[in-house]
Image (cartoon, rainbow, N blue to C red):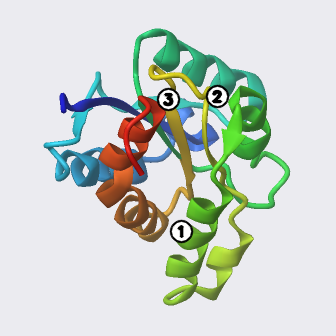
Amino acid sequence: MNPIRGRVITVSDRCAAGSAVDRSGPLAARLLAGYAEHVLLRDDVVIVPDGIEPLRRAIAEAVDDGVRLVFTTGGTGISPRDLTPEATLPLLAARLDGLAEQIRARGAEAAPAAGLSRGLVGITSREADAALIVNAPGSPGGVRDAVAVIGPIMGHIVEQLGGGDH
């Protein structure tokens, strides 16, 4: 199997404005690169401000570019500007709620507040060229949890979308 083309998108008003350093996006890129047989990251980490339209546009651009794994960090909480799930949901043909719950459960082992994450996991279509979208929390721990759940099965997910055996 050829490596899956992936892109990391950080969602943060402060990082987009340059008033904070993005730690979660580069961490996600490094961890995903650890699954080198499965993931070929495209471009540097993309940083967008919180909000529905900037993220929806960045995800759509990634999918249009042929990216098969879109991994977002940030914007999954409950503050007024945390709108990553709202930006992502209309782009999904099917949600993979079990994976989102696994990410939250893994995080809750160390940080009870992990249950506040509203991050989604899903696919953009049921076609062979569909993209997997993963919304990870913006914390380094949340990113580690999401990659630990998704990393080992990315290849299997993409094979399934291509009609592969269960």
Viewer-proximal residue among 163 and 44: 163
Label pair 3/2, CB-CB below 8 angstroms: no
Q: Residues within 10 Å of mark 1 (few under 14, many from 20)?
A: many
Q: CA distance from mark 2 to mark 1?
A: 21 Å
Mark 1 vs 3, N-terminal side: 1
Q: CA distance from mark 1 to mark 3?
A: 19 Å
Viewer-proximal residue among 93 and 84: 93
Q: Amino acid at mark 1?
A: Ile
| Horizontal relation, residue 88 to residue 110: left or right | right
SS category of the residue bearing label 3? loop
SS category of the residue bearing label 2? helix
Give coordinates of residue 153: x percent, y percent.
35, 55
Q: What number is the disc on residue 131?
A: 3
Residue under the point 76% across and 37% down: 89
Q: Amino acid at mark 2?
A: Leu
Q: What number is the disc on residue 45?
A: none
Q: What number is the disc on residue 103?
A: 1
Q: Residues within 10 Å of mark 3 (few under 14, many from 20)?
A: many
Give coordinates of residue 65: x percent, y percent.
42, 10
Q: In the rendered view of the protein, which quadrant contains the N terminus?
A: top left
SS category of the residue bearing label 1? helix
Give coordinates of residue 76: x percent, y percent.
68, 54
Residue under the point 80% across and 57% down: 79
Q: Amino acid at mark 3?
A: Ala
Farthest residue to the top: give it.
64
Q: What number is the disc on residue 55?
A: 2
Q: CA distance from mark 3 to mark 2?
A: 15 Å
Mark 3 vs 2, N-terminal side: 2
Mark 2 vs 1, N-terminal side: 2
